[in-house]
Image: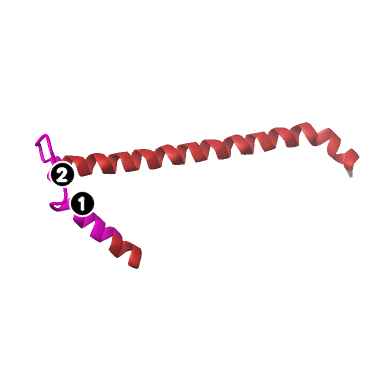
Amino acid sequence: MEKLLTPYQSVITEIKSIISSGQEAAYSASSKAMLLTYWNIGKRIVEQELGGSERAEYGKGLISALADADCERMRS
């Protein structure tokens, strides 16, 4: 069996490398997408909370509503 694998070993090694590279690329793309998603969520929250002013009055609505919605989602 070992003699049969020898001629194909370089192809097998290359295929393993291709798979590994693809997995790394997928993981990286997924991480970047999640980072961008959460950055945009934070940006939107800040825009809502600031409402055009320079400082936000935290605790007056959106943050509390988001926390309540998240707690509700986690219960179901």
- In this rendering, would 46 be left or right of 26? left
Residue shown at 25% from the left, 56% from the top: 67
Residue 52 position within the rendered picture, expressed as x and y whole percent measured from the top left = 10, 37
Q: Quadrant of the C terminus?
A: bottom left
Q: Nearer the viewer, residue 14 or 53?
A: 53
Q: Quadrant of the N terminus?
A: top right
Q: Secondary structure at mark 1?
A: helix
- The residue type indicated by label 2 comes to Glu
Q: Secondary structure at mark 2?
A: helix
How would you rate the neighbour count of disc 1 (Cα within 10 Å): few for under 14, some for 14-19, many for 20 or more?
some
Task: Say the numbered circle drawn on residue 50.
Answer: none
**Mark 2 vs 1: CB contact within 8 A:** yes
Which residue bears the numbered disc 2?
49
- In this rendering, would 67 be left or right of 74? left
- In this rendering, would 52 be left or right of 9? left
Q: Report the coloring of the rendering.
A: secondary structure
Task: Say the numbered circle drawn on residue 63.
Answer: 1
- In this rendering, would 31 be left or right of 75? right
Residue stretch rendered in magenta on the structure: 50-70
Residue shown at 79% from the left, 35% from the top: 9
How far apart are the two marked residues, 2 and 1, measured between alpha carbons? Answer: 8 Å
Residue shown at 90% from the left, 39% from the top: 3
Which of the 4 image quarters holds residue 51?
top left
Q: Residue furthest bottom?
A: 76
